[in-house]
Amino acid sequence: MNRPGNLENHTLAVVVENKAGVLARVADLFARRGYNIVSLLVAPMDDERFSRITIVVSVESAPLDQIVKQLFKLVNVVEIMEMIPEASVERELIVANVKVPTERRDEFTAIIERAHGRILHDGDGHMMVSLAGEPAEVDAIEADLKAFDIFDLQRTGRVAMRIVGAEAPVTKV
Amino acid sequence: MTAPERLNGGQALIKSLEMENVEVVFGYPGGAILPVYDPIIDAKLRHVLVRHEQGAGHMAEGYAHATGKPGVCMVTSGPAATNVVTPLADAMLDSVPMVCITGQVALAAIGTDAFQECDTTGITRSITKHNFLVTRAEDIPRVIRTAFHIATTGRPGPVLVDIPKDIVDANNPAAYFDWYWPEIEDLELPGYQPNVDPDPTAIADAVELMLAAERPVLYVGGGVLKARGAEVLLELAELTNIPVVTTLMARGAFPDSHELCLGMPGMHGNYTAITAIQQSDLLIAMGSRFDDRVTGKVGAFAPGAKVIHVDIDPAEQGKVRMPDVPIVGDCRLAMELMVEELKAKGAPESLADSSAWRQQVSGWQEKYPLTYEQSAPGELLKPQYVLERLRDLSPEDTIVASGVGQHQMWASQYWTFDHPYTWINSGGLGTMGFSIPAAIGAKAGMMDRTVWSVDGDGNFQMTAQELVTAAVEKIPIKVALMNNAYLGMVRQWQSLFYEERLSEVYLSHDMPDYVKWAEAMGCVAFRVEDPDEVDAVIQKANEINDRPVVIEFRCHSEENVYPMVPAGGSNDAVIVDPTQQPTLDAERAAKEASQ
């Protein structure tokens, strides 16, 4: 996953019209032109005419500039912002269900508390936990959880938001 | 105020097409589109009944190429929609404005694997500029208006509108609504604002480079034709004395007989066009997209040139070659601003001296012109000869639509295109079978012009059925069928790059009997085998104006297209005609020795 300083991945916030098939158009474009999606997250915005897609793209396959320009050509794409690390905040959520033997419960809960995670469910020898944080924090907790027997684990992919007042390139509208 | 007109979706669709000033629709009816074919009976527009949906798509393209207006085709769902996939992809790659209407199964049946159902918008997503699945009858006028707006503005392209059967059904009460016709400003397109106005600063930067260039070349592509920019191109070239190459998509954008015209560059371009680009110090790419067939090996393309790239599509800037001056906008507007700025900066007097360059270029033209050897007595025809005669015996403003392959390259090379919109071909997708339907579409839009389809025998067998359409609909095109008994271009590659191991390329001269076939389809047909008969038969064909004509020219099978840049090779390694190659080899050896 992307860490600060990893120059090969970029985060784009893409505002699209909230219409049927728009996500398919975006996904198709990436597939058709051989661009790699690292993570993708989509939900309607406060103005429900629009959705915001946060895409982490790998620029190993094509320059970011070309990916952005091709995305722009989609009629339903309204705005694209690159979320550069110095001018934005990124957050990601991880939810995991982990088998925790009785003798390791204290060790496990200490890890979750230290990371400011939450225990969502506890029973039948399993603990379901969540943590929302910077991608690096999520990476760290994921690594810690791997010391246990993971039953199920899901990361959401990242959302990103610009810091007001920070300079960031906006590429459309 | 009068009460609004109450229309059903089918009536509204036809009325919307009329509001868009559509004169002709190329189409084919079927189950899901049936309700729309009823109001067509009373419509003002002309419907041309094709014999295969692929034909409808290429006719719409040919119409658009010739007239500059969007071509329209209409077909039913399922297999009909999949049959227009090829023309849509073709129109996408060659930026042809086109609106394709497809029938779809009723809304409630979508997703149930109903009879003749397919995911038309899904299938065509990457080969259309945009597509729509309409779900309410009252959306039809707005969607049709939007489709034409998107197809014809910015970088033109195909737009598909998929219409479920029930929303156009006269028996469905829910398909009726109060007619309206939206203004362009009222269309809901928050993400679509093509930028047509070039940045004046970039124009000024470009003009600086043009003033200083000693070996400039204008590398003109199809974008100039799409922008209706041929006139200002002539003005720009004459003001600056910059030589012009016209790509396969731009033949006719600059007159071939003009002394500044170097003809076509690229894989089968002529030596001078290719070499002038290679040795230029400034390449002005005008509505061209650095296609691999033009650049050859990209890293070795025009290595010493600074690049000005004018294109209305921002994504073309830097896609293949990073320009020194990118200019996003309409080519015509950009050239107008360039002319203005050049004059303001004292052109032509203030231009750097490029007379040595033009001298060098004309030296190449003299040394390495296009050439071929006339057939020996008893041999079949040389296709180049046939094309030269066809060119000289047909009206100067004849429209030529070609298929794909050797005959296409020879037609582009040997025709003299002195007018824009007289050359129609499938450049990007390279669609065999394009010629006959495209010629029909062009003729339908330009009934007073002579339209010649230059076709190959392989191509002809893919779409010849549309000659029935031409005969029945009285769209009298003429077909020059260059029958060399082979898939000639593939044979050429196998000869040159696969040690002459010919694999699955032989078609035969006389199977099928093209004359009988053409006659059976309602055409007048001739067969010519002897160079001495060529003129008389062409003249006869040019005099027939009430029916389509097919001339089968029996051509030599072994002829190769030269010059040729092997795929992926550097343009510096262009191979010229075998009679010229020794001179070129000697020149290259001498140059190497002197370095």
Image (cartoon, rainbow, N blue to C red):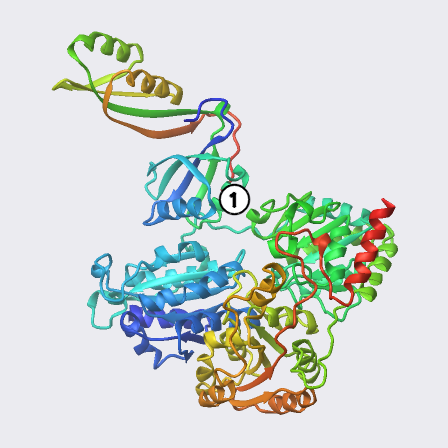
Residue found 70% across the figure and 66% down from its top: B254
Above or below: residue B168 compared with residue B146: below
Question: Does the image show residue B268?
Answer: yes
Above or below: residue B415 compared with residue B496: below
| Image quadrant where residue A18 sits | top left
On the image, the x and y values in percent for residue B83 come to 38, 67
Above or below: residue B120 compared with residue A172: below
Subunit ID for the residue under disc 1: A
Q: For this view, does A123 lie left or right of residue B325?
A: left
Query: Is label 1 in a helix, a strand or a loop?
Result: helix
Q: For this view, does B526 lie left or right of residue B98?
A: right
On the image, the x and y values in percent for residue A38 come to 41, 34
- Nearest the viewer among B69 and A69 is A69
Which image quarter is the C terminus of chain B in? top right
On the image, the x and y values in percent for residue B281 come to 77, 48
Question: Does the image show residue B438?
Answer: no
Above or below: residue B204 compared with residue B449: above
Circle 1 Cα neighbour tier, 10 Å, few/some/many (<14 / 14–19 / ≥20) = some
Residue found 64% across the figure and 43% down from its top: B322
Which image quarter is the N terminus of chain B in? bottom left
| Image quadrant where residue A47 sits | top left
- Nearest the viewer among A163 and B565 is B565
Q: For this view, does B395 lie left or right of residue A123?
A: right
- Nearest the viewer among B154 and A1 is A1
Most distant residue in the left direction:
A124
Q: Which amino acid does label 1 sit on?
A: Lys
> On the image, numbered disc 1 is attached to which residue?
A69
On the image, the x and y values in percent for residue B481 come to 57, 80
